[in-house]
Amino acid sequence: MRYLLLTLFVGTLFQSSAQVYQSKQPLVHTYSIVARDVNTGEMAVGVQSHWFSVGTSVPWAEAGVGAVATQSFVDKSYGPKALDLLKKGLTAQEVLNQLTAADPGREVRQVAIIDAKGNVATHTGKNCIQVASHIKGINYSVQSNMMLGDKVDEYMSEAFEKSNGKPLAERVLLALEAAQKAGGDIRGMQAAAIIVVPGKPTESWNNKTVDIRVDDAKEPLKELRRLYKVHLAYQHMNDGDLAVEKNDMSKAMADYNAAMQLFPENLEMQFWTAITLANNKQVDKALPMLKKIFLQDKNWKELTRRLPAVNLLTVAEKDLKRILSL
């Protein structure tokens, strides 16, 4: 019944709905933000919608190129097409002009593009379901459609601008949270996503510095916030590992401790921190941590037995016995 009503609705807008809406194009009525960090050059897309797995449809981004949000009666091809055109040297506005000019369904599209220079272009078709609007700012654009009230874009814009100086992903998340406080999607919440890419071109496997999404949840922004916190914790763990490789134990322990503070219940973070302490002649500090870990899950003790064989635990034999006797 829902799809029948949607088909009838589209039919009232267009004499030939087949030219505009296709079954492969999801109906992603939503709010989103595209943004750039003026200091780092990073670019980001953030989105929330009452539509399953919105992170697979709306946000598109590529390091050193740009970021795109394509929504409403979404045409996902806008994402890769826009990025390809940006790579050819077109500005965000030139790209948007070219894509909408070739699209017979442009009046039901909502699209925002930001390029690596901070140029912003936004389009809200006149037949997007109300409340539908957008605000272009310096190095960002916020846009929304099918909103409960008419303040969503204002709340997003204000939250983003007031958070200047914070990491870009945090600023995007704050904007999404502000949108929900303003009423958000008239249908409620279901899915959300954030993508952040470097400001300069990089290897394809390093294209995204943040890539988190929630496909289906009662409160997707709360879950997205939790996942972002976990992301930060693991970033500290990665930085700690790099510091160990450089024999900078002071920085390593600072990063490991920061990770554990963000994610205190995670046994793996505690475990590798303790192993690092043991490997750096601080067995006495490692022992109480390992004892606590082993009591919660004996498999960590079994893993500890296997580490000396691959040189990941390099303590003296007497200290190994102390550890394994816990």
Image: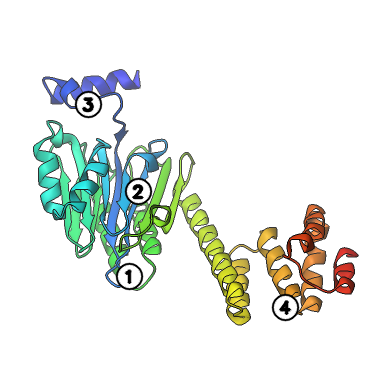
Kind of residue at disc 2: Val
Q: Secondary structure at mark 4?
A: loop
Kind of residue at disc 1: Thr
Classify mark 3: residues with Cα within 10 Å, few (<14), some (14-19) or many (20+).
many
Q: Which residue is mark 3?
A: 21
Name the image quarter holding the N terminus: top left
Q: Nearer the viewer, mark 1 or mark 2?
A: 1
Residue 265 seen from this side: no
Q: In the rendered view, tell whether residue 238 sits above or below residue 96.
A: below
Which residue does the image show at 32% across and 21% down from the upper left?
3
Kind of residue at disc 3: Tyr
Q: Quadrant of residue 247?
A: bottom right
Q: Which residue is mark 2?
A: 47
Which mark is first along the chain, 2 or 1?
1
Q: Which residue is mark 4?
A: 280
Residue 289 seen from this side: yes
Give residue 242's position: percent from left, percent from top.
Answer: 56, 70
Q: Is residue 133 left or right of residue 177?
A: left
